[in-house]
Image (cartoon, rainbow, N blue to C red):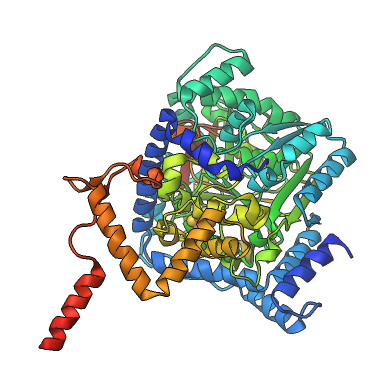
Amino acid sequence: MSARERILARIRERQGKPYEIDPVELAAVRTHLAAHPRSPGPRDAWDVNVRFRERATSLASTIDEAAVLSDVPALAAQYLRGREVPPRAVCWRELGELDWRGAGLDVEVRPAHGDDLVGITGVFCGISETGTLMTLSSPHSPSTVSLLPETHIAVLQQARIVRSMEDAWALVRTEVDGLPRAVSFISGPSRTADIEQTVTLGAHGPYRVHIIIVGG
Amino acid sequence: MQLTSNRFKQTARAKLADTDLQAALNKLQTNFVKGRADRVAELDNFEAIRDAATAIRDRALAHLDVYLAEFERNATAQGTVVHWAETTVDVNRIVCELAARYGVRKAVKSKSMVSEECALNDALEAAGIEVVETDLGEYILQLAKEPPSHIVAPVVHKTREQVSDLFEARHHRPRTTVIADLTREAREVLRPHFLSAQMGITGANFVVAETGSTLIVTNEGNGRMVTSLPRVHVAITGIEKVVPTLEDVTTLLRLLPRHGTAQTTTNYVSVTTGPRRADDSEGPEHFHVILVDAGRSRLLGGDMEAMLRCIRCGACMNHCPVYQSIGGHAYGWVYPGPMGSVLTPTYAGLENALDLPHASTLCNQCGVVCPVKIPLPDLLRKLREKQFARGLRPWSERAGLAIWGWTARHPRVYALLSAVGARLLNWLGGTDKRIRDLPGGKGWTVGRDIPAPEGKTFRALYAARRAENVRK
Ligand code: SF4
């Protein structure tokens, strides 16, 4: 008997179940998984657009507003200038066609390396309950771009701001075929409070998360 | 991790005298206790969410075998290899075998308490593999060669000066005591390790049966690196960590960071499903999940089952007056505080942690704050009963209880002894009626006075009142 069988057998024995998986129980479990019902969450009503901005800011993300997508390069360039960050970045393919050069930025479409300073990504959706960005990995949206550089600029369509993480999963279920390898929920710059319980921004991930909301 | 729980009393005494530790523990109360209260107060519908979280954990445990099998099926379908480990020794063997198979020379780790149970780092190092902890706190502990003292804030017992000393000695860079600079230094030292390691090792806060995913929460971003950059990713987690659906995990995520670090959400929640996909430019080529029993299944169907609901938030220790006084090291194993006082004796043996079930005032602060309503004081009380039933308590305590039991069953003797005892204590109290030094009770009076009993005994008062009522 393998370790797997012994562990499962022990579980069933402790719970007074028959040796084999009970088909009725299995069917009930599969029904639950297929239905994936929601549990109660917060009941408060809130304006998702207002709340997202509030929460994201409270988590030390900064926010800029772009009327249209083509305004993004100029805003990104201005942000980087303001922080004296060199005007070079890597970005996801979906943003590769923007006129970065026109804004004075040198932007390459590729995964990030350990020494890239700025990463520009899209966002699958924004979660207003917590001010969180949800990103999905794919060949064209590598997760290193939002992780390795010291500055992460995220481009979020306002129409993609949802209320809760449950709503975010619902969006994945309707728009994507199964989960991608890496789903990342990002809530502000990386931080640690390990030394003397003192919160310090910029641990292993970005020091800065700047969200440009398009169409607000 | 080496088990030293039976030295609880000696270690606790030393920790009480450690002023740096006491300062850190005081701060922990402001940050985590008050912080948790604030975060919970902000969360509308908290009690309903807490009930739902408890029900979710109970549902997973009631059908644990089926959910594990479903997790395995869905994970395998995505290309994940699922292993089952009955003991901590098996875990180490599996990881070392994987390391050998993939030619691993260096492994980077993000925080995993299960791997601490296994003493995995020692096993890997014995096999000639370099292991680098990447959570800042765990990294500091690795340099200091110390065990964690808290499951969420592992290095809470250290001061910045101690960290500066360590970094100076090990990094050979100019000394700094500025916390932001120390953090940057660790980032710069660890970054090359992330990029050069062949294996990433993580725990999992939850595994999701519906999708076959593993989920980890981190603030530093090291979890994301460890799961994305090395060629091989191994996630090690207890069998009880399975959760049915993404919706269920969402409910638990509303509570875990609020109770753990007083955050509404952690910086990162990383959900990993399978290895790198065809055409992906990044991600591990091989993804292995190890489901660990190591004593967990024994808790099912018994009076300790509720303990398996635990989501390792740490709130019970943050709120425990005993933990607040002595910190985590005295508990002598991986898990401190009330949850550790239940887990250590149940996983490592009742006889190996004799003091832990007693390291509690049973004030029930832990039970009140536990987000999944684990009745920790009840479990501790049951462990005390088990110890007694198995004859594991010292003879003096057993004799004392036997005498007490006999006396309590003989009311006349009881009345006599309690009257004599009360008078004796009254006499010991002297003129100001405070006992400063009780023979045989020094453990109590060394820290505080006992007010001496005064006036008549309860029994005498009761008898008098009854006689009066009869006359009326
Ligand atoms: S026992 Fe409860 S409070 Fe303690 S760590 Fe586990 S879930 Fe948190």
Q: Is residue A34 left or right of residue A152?
A: right
Q: Position of residue A151 (x, y in %)?
A: 53, 32
Q: Position of residue B323 (x, y in %)?
A: 45, 45
Q: What residue is at 51 percent from the left and 66 percent from the top? A: B53
Between A170 and B197, the one nearer to me in the picture = B197
* Residue that lies at the very extreme toward the left in this rendered image: B472
Q: Is residue B236 left or right of residue B256?
A: right
Residue B153 shows in the view: no
Between B111 and B116, the one nearer to me in the picture = B116
Count of marks placed on residues: 0
Residue A96 higher or lower than B373, as above or below: above
Q: Is residue B22 left or right of residue B95?
A: left
Quadrant location of the C terminus of chain B in the rendered image? bottom left
Between B39 and A211, the one nearer to me in the picture = B39
Q: Is residue B161 left or right of residue A47?
A: right
Q: What residue is at 52 percent from the left and 60 percent from the top? A: B399
Q: What residue is at 59 percent from the left and 60 percent from the top? A: B387
Q: Position of residue A192 (x, y in %)?
A: 50, 35
Q: What residue is at 73 percent from the left and 64 percent from the top? A: B71
Residue B184 shows in the view: yes
Quadrant location of the N terminus of chain B in the rendered image? top right
Q: Position of residue A186 (x, y in %)?
A: 54, 46
